[in-house]
Amino acid sequence: TGTNFVGVTSVSFNGTNAAFTVSSTTTISALVPTGATTGTIAVVTTSKSVSSSGSFTVLPSAPTITTFTPTSGAVGATVTITGTNLASATNLYFNGTSATIGTNTSTSITTTVPAGATSGPITVVTAGGTGNSGTVFNVLPGIPTVTSFTPSSGIVGSWVTITGTNFASVTNVKFGTTSALSYTVDSSTQISAMVPAGAATGAISVTNTNTTGTSGSNFSVLPNPPVITGFTPNSGWVT
């Protein structure tokens, strides 16, 4: 707003020309142009040029997320996010869980999947607004590790307690190369498994939907104890 807006030929934001409409001799409506920076607003008429006494602050445009690579990963995995207007990012979230912003430019951000993250969209927050990915990032379970098992040996049919980490979404437990038909995931750090028929001495491995972890030592499969099914004759003399 101002006075004597007659014969206006241009309006500029800190030197960048803008599209405008003169509404009256006291009012001009102008669109902040692409490439504008913070500074004074200038109005040029057929008779003179005037500039505002104060500065107009140009805020960054809202961020957009176009892609991210990879599209899935475990906690700690590196993810590269691409889009627009990302340089001033202040916050980054994986389905609501805050992540650390690593290197970033106007078109990309490098980060890692934060602890506690779950599958969902990625969100970037800047001074210009908030941008959400149009697709979901899938958080995979961490690589399982087998740190120990008790007992260290046993016969087919005996139960073994396996301890380690990332025992989530477990799909298979093996004794050597033989899958255990019976196992229970007691917690994210413990599994109870039965030594399967046909198992031989070897490492114990645990597989989840991401990958497989293997013990550093072997479980010894012992031979089954002898079983007496009968005897003939059923009586006799001491010899």
Image (spheres, rainbow, N blue to C red):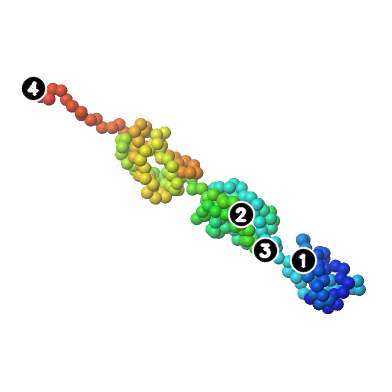
Left or right: residue 157 versus residue 207 is left
User: Relative to the observer, which residue lies in front, 174 or 95?
Assistant: 95
Q: Residue at x 31, y 37 (%)?
A: 157
Q: Secondary structure at mark 4?
A: loop
Q: Quadrant of the N terminus?
A: bottom right
Q: Residue at x 54, y 58 (%)?
A: 97
Q: Residue at x 31, y 33 (%)?
A: 222
Left or right: residue 213 versus residue 21 is left
Few, some or many C-alpha atoms within 10 Å of disc 4 (few <14, some 14-19, many ≥20)?
few
| 3 or 4: mark nearer the eye | 3
Q: CA distance from mark 3 to mark 1?
A: 17 Å
Task: Residue at the far right: name it.
Answer: 47
Left or right: residue 13 versus residue 204 is right
What's the residue type where badge 4 is placed?
Trp
Residue 44, given in percent of the width and then of the height, sits at 87, 70
Which residue is tagged 2?
133
Q: CA distance from mark 2 to mark 1?
A: 28 Å
Which residue is tagged 1?
31
What's the residue type where badge 3 is placed?
Gly
Q: Which mark sits nearer the N-terminus, 3 or 2?
A: 3
Q: Which mark sits nearer the N-terminus, 3 or 1?
A: 1
Which residue is tagged 4?
237
Residue 116, given in percent of the width and then of the height, sits at 50, 55
Q: Is residue 161 above or below residue 130?
A: above
Which residue is tagged 3?
128
